[in-house]
Amino acid sequence: MLVLLGAFAVLPLALPWLVGRIGPRGFYVAALVPIAAFVHAAVMGPGILAGETPFETFAWIPALGIDLSLRMDTLGWVMALIVTGVGALVMIYCRWYFDGKKDGVGLFCAVLLAFAGAMYGLVLSDDLIVLVMLWEITSVLSYLLIGFYHRRGASRRAALQALMVTTLGGLVMFVGAVMLTVIYGTSSLSTILATGLTLPADQTATLNAAIVLMLVGALSKSAIFPFHFWLPGAMAAPTPVSAYLHAAAMVKAGIYLIARLAPAFALAEPWRPIVISLGIFTMLLGGVQALREADLKRILAFGTVSQLGMLTAVLGYGTRDAALAGLALLLGHALFKSALFLVVGIIDRQLSTRDITELSGVGRQAPTLAVVSIIAVCSMAGVIPTIGFVAKESVLTALLGDASNSGWAWVGLIGIVLGSALTAAYGLRFIWGAFWTKKDSVGAARPVTEWPDPPVGFLASPVLLSALTLAAGLSAPLLDTALAGYADTVPGEHHVHLALWHGIEPALLMSLGSIAVGIAVFWLVQRTGWHRRTLPFTANDAYNAVLRGIARLSVWTTTLTQRGSLPVYVGTIFVVFVAAEGTALLATPDWQVQLEGWQTPMQLVVAPIMILAGLVAVRARKRYTGVVLVSVTGMGMVLLFATSGAPDLALTQILVETVTLVAFALVLRRIPSRMGEHNASVLPVARAVLAIAVGATMSLVAIVATGARIAEPISDRFPQLAYEVGHGMNVVNVALVDLRGWDTMGELSVLILAATGVASLVFVTHRADVLSSSTPALPTGVTRYLRPLIETEAGPRPRAAAPGSTRQTWLLGGQRVRPENRSIMLEVIVRILFHTIIVCSIYLLFAGHNLPGGGFAGGLVAGMALVMRYVAGGRYELGAAAPTDAGRLLGAGMTLAVACAVLPLLFGEAPLTSFFFEADVPVLGHIEFVTSTLFDIGVYLVVIGLVLDVLRSLGAEVDRQLQESRDRGVSVS
Amino acid sequence: MNVSLVLIIVMGALFAAGVFAMLERSLTRVLIGFLLLGNAANLFLLIVMGKPGLAPFFGVASDPEDMSDPLPQALTLTAIVITFAVSAFLLALIYRSWQLGQADTVEDDEADIAVRERGAVDEDTMDDESTAEDDEATTDFVGTETAPITVLHHRDVDALRDDAPIDMPGDRPTGRSPDTGRGDDA
């Protein structure tokens, strides 16, 4: 069985290709798998009748106790025969139905076969969780099958509706399945059912809840009221799909589950009220609806809804006799309903319509089809000698037999008799509608629809199914033995036998009576032309209203939370922060406050300046004012760092403040100095309150958090570690490049992202390296003769080459700055200082391991040198100073850092492990080298790259854009 | 651990000022607020460093207590550089925003406003789709060219040449066009 299930899973993968090669004949290949499964089940038949239960298992997820186990007891066997047998016939039928069609047929074929496999597994699975999984797979695959005509809106909507309803049910059922698994401590269905209701009393309520949840899944799948509406909608599927999914397979999954659970749970409190009342109501509802329809397929669809209601009520009733009758009914329904659907498919294929008002006189031209249909309808209405008759007789007998025990039997009995009358009526309507010669309003016969004879192969499947309907009825005693294996699992007295003739008894009279009433109803409907609705709305409208309600709710929620306003979002974050932190602070009142007024005199000096600068900065009307005041607070930080034993921080902060100010200046030169004129500040009071709350909360957090420290800080061991592991004296630097190297790695990524972001915002479309290529090339020989350069018309040239000019070249790009912007003083200073600063930065980089400095400080200093070149010589000078793309620097730095992280892995060490080398070199003396220095070089390169990117984007590129608009004659503000 | 009240007050003030500015619509003010917030956060790290001591170099103090805590310093160093990177990004945003709209203010998101103001008209348009005409089709073969299959079909037996017009797709013996296959009584 597991092998077959595997075949069902694998072959669909090849089918789209195969059908693409050999066309619809590929359906024959697809049919091989269900045929094999059918033959396998048939061969197992004698053993199963003798009481064996084949069982195969494969431990799938042992940790959760979920097994892929298949168990073929009588119920599973019957279901497997139906699913594979009808599946094979439908596939053979598809070969003709899709004849000459190309689009999507291969995919359709694959999905259909996969669906058959899922059904096969579903009816045999002994693991509840696997069953639910297969259940969901059938839902998803049926979505694809129903939506086969995906170009049609109706088809798409119907598919989505079926999916929504069945997966909603499946989800509810999943909860139920999990509850059952927890209650019984196993997911094995047979074990659960064997234990049944014999549970401790305190678990009854949970069990009942679980049972109701399982029933919701079953009822939604089987289109029982209030979920019945999706099935008629699903008639938008190709007819073979309707024949298989909506007669034999998918809708039977719910019935199967009810039949599976009924032996154990039928006596549970909520079971019968739900199953019988909803089943009977659905039966009547579907029957009435079917009388109103004019589309043959929809007549059958509502008929199916009606029959499913009946099956639910009978199989869910939970006595031995009802179970036997119900299983016979299930078999009968699968045979006759798929036969009828296939007949409709043939009519549709040949005539391109299924409307009974358009068809006329088809029966005389297509006698085979008519006979097939009449036999099937007889079985549906319960006319001797079909299986439908046998089943209905025994249903009525079974319910009559239990009528003295339960009131529900009477409900079922009356409902089924009434429902059977309706069944007979719509059965007649189907036959009349499809095959009779109709009369128009004045009574004259309507023109006969011309009928092209279909090939025998197309007819084979419905003929066979209909023949089986007859054969099964005639071999009723055989069937009785076969199905008894399931019926005997249900407790109850043993009255009923399946037989063609029981003699004149009450059930027979009731059956005949219902058929007679049915004929009368049909006649009445034909006479009056009744098709009014009783209710002003349909279940479909209710479904749409619910969907619309959900959509409205989501729009409402979205508008409530997504205000689209930055201040609201930022404000929300701060409000949540204050609320959460405030609550946490107030919840722990035992604060250990250890405060002192100040620690160094510098704090007293700096504090008022920083506070004042901060407060004034936010009220500033001009951008420069604000920016400079912010810098004041930054400089305050420098002083605090410097006096708190943090030289590295002071160094880095002062460099960053400078670069930030430069970057600000670069941008602010393009935008007006005054701000907030068009968009005045809103709600200043509310903002102030929130701001003060945040400030107060943070202050409290600082006080409480520092007072709450009880453990020894981890950093007490840092100096020792830094020296022994990192081979460096500067603890902060070693922490950055070695002890906490991952932090730095993350930071480098942020820097690269930010730099790239800056470049993309300014360059927008490209990031061509135009700067370095536009730098004039120096004539060769310059370096050889070492003559000073002078400015000529052609650019900087050695002095001897152009004696006419006397002005010396200090910076390569200086000449290209507009004369009024040039400052010879600046050029000279930069010319003298640049290399010194670069050497300085390299010194900081390498000294950083033992002295203040490091990659960050070094990189920023180098960046400052670039800033100087740019400020003095403009963008061409920048191109000359850094003849490379900033992206390359960033990439090289990051590559180096990542290499430092990854390479130790090759030696079996943890990432970022550093190695130490020392040697005595003759001239240089004792040399020590730690590999984490390489990491620091990576940091150095990334920081230079960041500064360079800012300069190139906000500086050089903005210059270029300015120049461009100036050249175009546009006035620039 | 003893902490300095003065520093806490400065930190609180900077946080308050930063938040106040960040809640503005002007991007420049947001940037100012962001920088103030960054400084305040660094100050917070400085405060939890505890009592300032000697600079954290190996060998300057025998007792770790005499040395400033190096861990918050490492964190702060990272934070300083990241603050610079992010403010550079914000500056680029300001420049771009000015370039495009001659303003550095962040307006409310248009799509969000559109969702809020989505009226009954839009909902009707959405519903129109659900009452499309093909709902009532009474055939699988709406708009597809499918000829009836007949007993002998040249596609079944290759040798057979069936020239009867009924086999040609689109040429229907009943004279139906795909459109008349639709129900008109429902």
Image: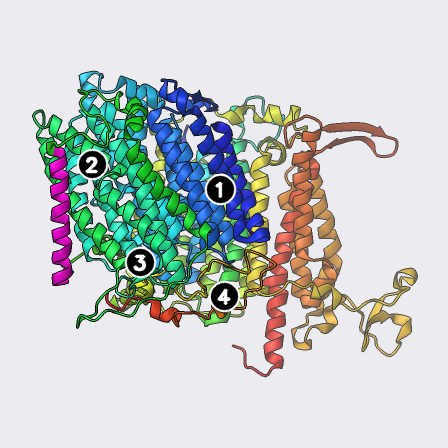
Q: Which residue is mark 3?
A: A363
Mark 1 on the same chain as mark 4: no
**Residue A892 pos. (x, y %):** 69, 47
Query: If you read the primary sequence from the N terminus, does the residue marked by circle 2 or circle 3 appear first?
Result: 3
Which of A585 and A615 lies nearest the eye of the viewer? A585
Q: Residue A154, located in which quarter of the rendered image? A: bottom left
Q: Which mark is residue A392?
A: 2
State if disc 4 and disc 1 touch (CB < 8 Å): no
State if disc 3 and disc 2 touch (CB < 8 Å): no
**Residue A524 pos. (x, y %):** 11, 57
Query: If you read the primary sequence from the N terminus, does the residue marked by circle 1 or circle 2 appear first?
Result: 1
Q: CA distance from mark 2 to mark 3?
A: 28 Å
Q: Amino acid at mark 2?
A: Lys
Q: Amino acid at mark 3?
A: Gly
Magenta-span inclusion, residue A530: yes
Residue A162 falls left or right of residue A921: left
Secondary structure found at label 4: helix
Q: Which residue is mark 1?
A: A31
Q: CA distance from mark 4 to mark 2?
A: 45 Å
